[in-house]
Amino acid sequence: MSHSNRSPAEHAAAGRTTGPSAHAIAVLLVAGVARALRSCWRAAAQTARLAIGIPDYDVYVDHLRRHHRGREPMDRDTFFRERMQSRYARGSSRCC
């Protein structure tokens, strides 16, 4: 029987495997779960910030880069200061 015509069982019996090891599969699975958890955490944190009225600096920077390419974004501290001042300034129109 030629080497290329062996069945998977014959390869296994010869000490060869036909697919990735259990360790490799576990590593890939853990990496995928970690990516999914990071993504869920980012979404939950962004939702919480929006719910309590904290502006999202990363969304601001992304928006500026996509729609206002020539403008330099404010630094994080300036952004939060400006957003809080805009939100709570006297004379601003509010719904309630």
Image (cartoon, rainbow, N blue to C red):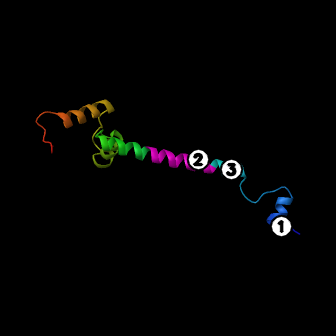
In 3D space, how far apart are the residues under numbered discs 3 and 2 (Cα atoms)?
Answer: 11 Å
**From the viewer's perspective, is 24 left or right of 14?**
left
View extreme (right): residue: 1
Q: Quadrant of the C terminus?
A: top left
- Across and down, in percent, residue 78 comes to 28, 31
Place of residue 62 in the rendered image (x, y in percent of width and height, measured from the top left):
34, 45
Magenta extent: 28-41
Asked which quadrant contains residue 6, the reply is bottom right
Q: Nearer the viewer, mark 2 or mark 1?
A: 2
Q: Residues within 10 Å of mark 1 (few under 14, many from 20)?
A: few
Looking at the picture, tell me which residue is in the foreground, 82 or 26.
Answer: 26
Look at label 3 and name its amino acid: Ala
Are discs 2 and 1 less than 8 Å apart at CB? no
Q: Residue at x 27, y 46 (%)?
A: 68
Q: CA distance from mark 3 to mark 1?
A: 24 Å
- Residue under numbered circle 1: 6
Q: Which residue ends up furthest to the left in the rendered image?
A: 91
Amino acid residing under circle 1: Arg
What residue is shown with label 3?
A: 24
The verdict on residue 45 being magenta is no
According to the picture, the residue beneath numbered tag 2 turns out to be 31
Task: Label 2, secondary structure: give it.
Answer: helix
